[in-house]
Every structure is written in C-alpha cells, then in structure tokens.
Image: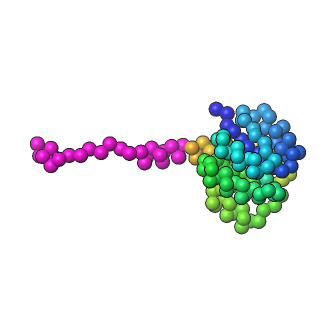
Amino acid sequence: MKFNIMFVDDSISVLKSLRWIFMDEPYHIFLFDSPLEALSAIDSKKFAVVVADQSMPEMAGIEFLEKVKQRSPDTVGIIMCDFVEPETASTAINGGVVNRFIEKPLDIHEIKQAVAIALARFEINVENRKERVSIFQPRTVFSFQQQDLLS
C-alpha cells in the first residue's frame, strides 16, 4: 500500500528539495505552498503524514496541523522549523497535534526517518481506531423470560 504524504511550506525551493529527497520512496507525495489549499486537499484525500513548516504567512504550522487533526484524526503531523519555543513544542506534542519537530536546514536522513516513524504511528492510529469501533459495535443481547430459565 502506498501512503499519501503531504508537505506544506511557503518556500518553493524547500518543496522541490523534499520532492527530490522522497522521489525514490514508495509514497504518493503531495506538495503545497499554501496551508489553505492543503486543507482543502485533506477533505478529499486521506493522508498518513503531513509535514508542515512552522513559519508560513497564511497560518503557523502548528495551527495548520490542529486543523488537519480535526479533519483527519489518524494523520500524523511533523513540523519543520528554524526555532520553536519549548513550551509551544511541549503543548503541541502533548496535545497529539505534532509527532515530531525537525530543524531546518533539513537533514535528509532525519526527515526520511521522521516520515517512516510517523507512518508506523499512523498505522497504529488506524488499527487502534478499528479496535475501538469493534468494541463499541452493538452486540446481540439475549432476552430470557423467567419461565425459560426454570424449564
């Protein structure tokens, strides 16, 4: 199964680099230079991993990933950034919005590893959701009359 991976960054050169980094990987890669356009794609396609830049003019990466999480709870988010406040990072990770922060400039091996780990997390999320759904599926309930129990 080929997973859909989304990259969102207002820098076209970063997006081109990401396309080059992941061109030999077994993923469907989607590149967006606008978080607003990327959000509309979330409504039409299931993405396993979304990697977003923190510093974008239309919307901060963490805010973008919060919106992604509302629309696609199983999707795993990664933030690319030059710097992020420790408190902001802690809140985003503890809230389940961001799985990992990656510093720019990007290291090829680090970004590939982060996406691979995020894919494993996505598969766990999907499996856990299936298990929760099956636990709450209505079961057949048998009704006995008192006379049935006595005979």
According to the image, what is the colour scheme of the structure?
Answer: rainbow
Numbered disc total: 0
Tell me where residue 82 appears, x and y as whole percent: 83, 58
Tell me where residue 90 appears, x and y as whole percent: 69, 63
Looking at the rendering, the stretch of residues picked out in magenta corresponds to 127-151
Magenta-colored stretch includes residue 131? yes
The image quadrant where one finds the N terminus is top right
Tell me where residue 123 appears, x and y as whole percent: 60, 42
Residue 67 found in image quarter: bottom right
Q: Quick check: 71 left or right of 151?
A: right
Q: Residue at x 79, y 45 (%)?
A: 32
Residue 97, compared with residue 132, is above or below; it is below
Q: Residue at x 71, y 41 (%)?
A: 5
Q: Residue at x 68, y 45 (%)?
A: 42
Residue nearest the viewer, comparing 100 with 57: 57
Magenta-colored stretch includes residue 94? no
Residue nearest the viewer, comparing 45 with 134: 45
Q: Quick check: 74 left or right of 151?
A: right
Tell me where residue 98 appears, x and y as whole percent: 68, 55
Q: Residue at x 81, y 47 (%)?
A: 33
The image quadrant where one finds the C terminus is top left
Q: Let me know if residue 11 appears in the view.
A: yes
Q: Let me know if residue 100 appears in the view.
A: no
Which residue is at the far left?
151
Residue 19 found in image quarter: top right
Residue 87 found in image quarter: bottom right
Which residue is at the far bottom?
87
Q: Quick check: 135 left or right of 147?
A: right
